[in-house]
Every structure is written in C-alpha cells, then in structure tokens.
Image (tube, rainbow, N blue to C red):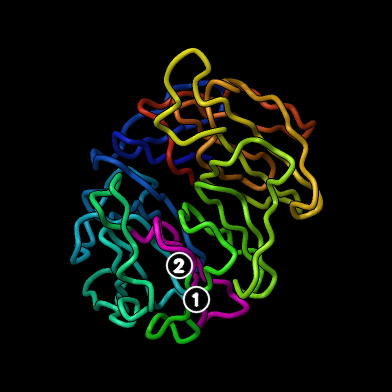
C-alpha cells in the first residue's frame, strides 16, 4: 500500500504508514488534487503546472496538456470514458480519449453569476476547485468554485444550473455521497444538501471554527476538519487552531477528537485504504486513525499536504 500526497512543492509518495518520510515523485509545483477512479488505470495529479497521470504508482508521470496550465480539479465519468479538468481561471474541459485531446465545456461560462466569480486573493479570478460525479447518476456533474458556489449539470457538463442559494460561496471541496447528497466544505462553514443543492443545511453551528477545506465519508462515519480563521492567521503562537471532527450521523452531531499536530496544525485532506483513515495537515504531517479510533503519526512530507489518495 502506498499513499500519494499533493503538496505545495509537488507530489510525494508514502511507501508505508510507519512514520517514514515521503519521497518526491513529481516536481509540479502546487498540487491541489490527487485522485484515482474506478475503471481508469493510474493516478491523476491536478497541479498549477498541469494535469498529470501516472500508470505505475507514481514512478513516472505524463503531462496531459490541458489547454490551461493551472489545473485545480479532475474527475472521470463512472464508465471511464470521459475525463474532466477544472482550471484557474474557472473553465472546464472534457476529454473523451483520457487526455489525448480536450474540448472546453463552454456552457459553464453561461451561468448567471459567472462575472461575479473573483476575489483579490486569487488574482481577482476564481477556479474550479472540486469536481464530482456519482455512479448512480453518471450524467450529472457537480462543480465547486472558489469563489463562486456549487453548480450542477445533468448533461455531462454541456449546460449548468446554479445551486448556490443558502451556501457560502467560497467552496473548497464538494463530497459527493449520493446522486443528490453532497457535503460542501467552504471558507465560511460546512454544508449538506439532500436535494442536489436546491437547499443547504449548515452543519458547523456548534463550533467556532468556520474554515473548512475537505470532508470524507468512510464506513458510515463523516470526517471534517476546520480552522478558526483562514490561512493568513495560521502563523504565530496558536498556529491554525484546528479541530478534527467525526460524525456517525451524517453531520447531525460531531465529536471533536485530538490528533497529532493539533490544534496548531489543521487537516486539509483525507484518504483511506478500506481499514484505516488518513489525514494530511498544513505542516506536512500524515496522521492515521486505527480501528480502535486512536490517531497516530504516520509520516511527514514538506510544505503542507493539500491532497491525498491511497493506491
């Protein structure tokens, strides 16, 4: 078993989980997503220098030449025949030959609020930070935009509907649990929908921490993590002031649990191998939840872990 980690300094690989430091396998700059997909061989890395694919566990990588260099998200259709890439600025592309050629999905630019997707901290632009598809609704795509909200397409990305009412629009990640059930991790809260984004319920009302980056559902347990404030406040004596949250009821209630590095470090990414859950922090720490519920150190990578995937 190996774990692939996207960091601010490229892609790293943990060969095991016994505390061994990771080795760099791709010098790609900031790496926002690393993902594998059923029916598609290899692992994909969405980075600020391009979208890459490795077919050999991370030993070698091929640049898939997305038309825009800064790729922030990637997803494959459940049948493995279509690959989607979301970029900065916020554009969306599809490939029907697994990256040999690309076509822009122009309908994404026709959304009514498209001109409002910008923020000074991202060069007065936005990016497609999260993409998701559920196998029970293979033609439906879910896109999360930072900053711009959540949007849904029911025709494989050709046309889109805004699903941002009641949702804080600084969207970092959308966890697709079912065809209509999603959990959105935002810069201003954690939200859940049971109707494909037509309405949203806020889940973090019992906590003072509002900055969420990603959530995961493993074995019926929902995991999330947050900082009290955005990353600009994460330096100094208190660090990120992070919390790690676990829920057994889909977010109706959460338990705040201790973890190595907390609260000075905040968890930014999740993965699992079927038995154990792994989390990566902004300081590059990999932590592991064992079957007894205890969290322990599992290794280090430099410059912060922004994405995780188990192989």
Query: Is 146 covered by the magenta stretch?
Result: yes
Residue bearing mark 1: 152
In magenta, the rendered stretch is: 127-150
Give the x, y percent position of residue 126: 32, 58
Q: Give the side of residue 134 with respect to residue 125, left or right.
A: right
> Alpha-carbon distance for marks 1 and 2?
6 Å
The residue lying at 48 percent from left, 39 percent from top is 3
Q: Residue at x 30, y 75 (%)?
A: 95
Image-based side of 239 in relation to 242, left or right:
left
Q: In front: 306, or 309?
A: 306
Which mark identifies residue 308? none
Magenta part, dominant SS:
strand
Q: Which residue is mark 2?
A: 143
Residue 83 vertical position relative to residue 293 in the rendered view, above or below: below
Horizontal side of 217 relative to 270 (left or right) equals: right
| Badge 1 density bin: few <14, some 14–19, many ≥20, Cα 10 Å | many
The residue positioned 38% from the left and 72% from the top of the image is 113
CB contact under 8 Å: marks 1 and 2: yes
> Does residue 93 sit above or below 246 in this rendering?
below
Residue 192 visible somewhere in the drawing: yes
């Amino acid at each position: 078993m190996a774990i692939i980690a996207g960091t601010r300094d490229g892609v790293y690989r943990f060969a095991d989980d016994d505390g061994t430091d990771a080795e760099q396998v791709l010098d790609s700059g900031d790496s926002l997503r690393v993902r594998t997909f059923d029916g598609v061989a290899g692992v994909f890395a969405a980075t600020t220098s391009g979208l890459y694919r490795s077919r050999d566990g991370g030993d070698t990588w091929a640049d898939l030449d997305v038309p825009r260099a800064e790729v922030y998200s990637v997803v494959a259709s459940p049948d493995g025949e279509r690959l989607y890439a979301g970029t900065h600025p916020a554009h969306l592309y599809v490939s029907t030959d697994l990256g040999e050629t690309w076509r822009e999905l122009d309908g994404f630019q026709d959304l009514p609020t498209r001109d409002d997707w910008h923020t000074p901290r991202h060069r007065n632009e936005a990016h497609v930070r999260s993409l998701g598809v559920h196998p029970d609704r293979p033609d439906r795509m879910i896109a999360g935009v930072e900053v711009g909200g959540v949007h849904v397409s029911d025709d494989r990305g050709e046309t889109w509907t805004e699903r941002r009412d009641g949702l804080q629009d600084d969207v970092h990640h959308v966890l697709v649990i079912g065809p209509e059930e999603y959990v959105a991790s935002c810069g201003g809260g954690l939200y859940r929908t049971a109707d494909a984004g037509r309405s949203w319920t806020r889940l973090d009302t019992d906590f003072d921490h509002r900055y969420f980056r990603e959530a995961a559902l493993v074995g019926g347990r929902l995991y999330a993590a947050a900082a009290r404030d955005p990353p600009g406040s994460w330096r100094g004596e208190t660090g990120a002031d992070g919390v790690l949250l676990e829920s057994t009821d889909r977010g109706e209630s959460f338990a705040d649990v201790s973890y190595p590095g907390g609260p000075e470090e905040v968890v930014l990414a999740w993965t699992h191998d079927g038995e154990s859950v792994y989390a990566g922090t902004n300081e590059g720490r990999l932590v592991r939840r064992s079957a007894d519920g205890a969290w322990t150190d599992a290794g280090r990578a430099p410059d912060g872990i922004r994405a995780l995937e188990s192989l």
